[in-house]
Image: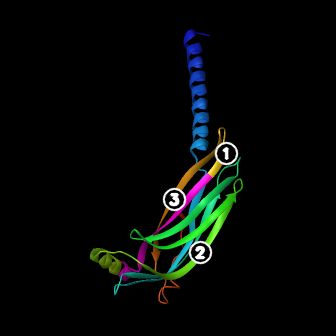
């Protein structure tokens, strides 16, 4: 066997070893960096979204949605405290839900079904009122749903608390009697 052939074999073995080490490191990094809480809006429906500007600017709404809150950990339960969902239009909160405290077991998901109707005072400038009117003409509204609270979990050093803040950006079509049969299926939205 010549030196050149022996050198090539050693070089290939080193490259293969390096490739395997890099693959293992990548898999470990993905597992470590994977978020432990997974939030998504599975379904949402808007059947009323009206603005009244006299005597104050009020938003009248009928909103329903389904949110999933998942514990992606495969080795530990997670405790959630002071959990709240808030719904916003143009940075104005118009609805909120107190979820309180709960525990999610390993690889489990909590489903939150919410349906509410009401009205809320909102602070919109004249330009924002005009933007609302344009959205009303198209029938689509941009709504944000936020999930906030604390996640308590155990690590090597004891119990840790992490403050959570997830934003779900939705573009919802106002469901009316004219478009209720032509509306497409809602595509789930991941929250970040």
Q: What separation in Å lies between label 3 and label 1 (alpha carbons)?
A: 21 Å
Q: Main secondary structure of the magenta part?
A: strand
Q: Residue 47: x and y, percent?
A: 50, 83
Q: Is residue 108 left or right of residue 89?
A: right
Give 65 or 153, whichever is nearer the viewer. 153
Quarter in which the N terminus is drawn: top right
Q: Secondary structure at mark 2?
A: strand
Quarter where residue 135 is shown: bottom left
Residue 166 is marked as 3
Residue 176 rendering spot, x and y as whole percentages:
48, 87
Foreground label between 1 and 2: 1
Placement of 182 over or under 71, stated as above or below: below
Q: Which residue is mark 1?
A: 154
Q: Which of the marked residues, 1 or 2, is nearer the chain's N terminus? A: 2
Q: Is residue 104 magenta?
A: no
Q: Which residues are magenta?
A: 135-151
Q: In the displayed image of the protein, which residue is found farthest to the bottom?
A: 177
In the rendered structure, which disc, 3 or 1, sits on the residue that comes first in sequence? Answer: 1
Between 80 and 143, the one lying in front of the other is 80
Say the numbered circle drawn on residue 114. Answer: 2
- Residue 187 locus on image (x, y percent): 53, 68
In this rendering, the count of numbered labels is 3
Picture disc at residue 90: none
Residue located at (56% from left, 44% from top): 33
Quadrant of the rendered structure where residue 29 is?
top right
Left or right: 126 in relation to 92: left
Q: Position of residue 167 (x, y in %)?
A: 49, 61
In the rendered view, would you say 117 is above or below 93? below
């Amino acid at each position: 066997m010549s030196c050149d052939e022996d050198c090539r074999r050693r070089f290939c073995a080193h490259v293969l070893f390096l490739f395997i080490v890099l693959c293992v490191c990548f898999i470990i990094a993905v597992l470590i960096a994977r978020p432990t809480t997974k939030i998504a809006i599975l379904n949402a429906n808007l059947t009323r979204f009206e603005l009244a500007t006299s005597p104050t600017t009020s938003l009248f709404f009928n909103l329903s949605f389904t949110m999933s809150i998942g514990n992606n950990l495969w080795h530990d339960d997670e405790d959630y405290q002071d959990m709240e969902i808030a719904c916003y239009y143009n940075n104005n909160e118009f609805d909120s839900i107190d979820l309180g405290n709960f525990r999610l077991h390993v690889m489990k998901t909590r489903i939150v079904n919410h349906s509410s109707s009401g009205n809320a005072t909102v602070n919109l400038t004249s330009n924002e009122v005009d933007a609302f009117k344009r959205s009303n003409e198209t029938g689509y509204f941009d709504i944000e749903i936020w999930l906030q609270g604390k996640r308590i979990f155990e690590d090597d050093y004891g119990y840790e608390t992490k403050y959570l803040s997830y934003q779900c950006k939705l573009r919802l079509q106002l469901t009316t009697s004219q478009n209720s049969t032509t509306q497409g299926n809602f595509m789930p939205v991941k929250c970040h």
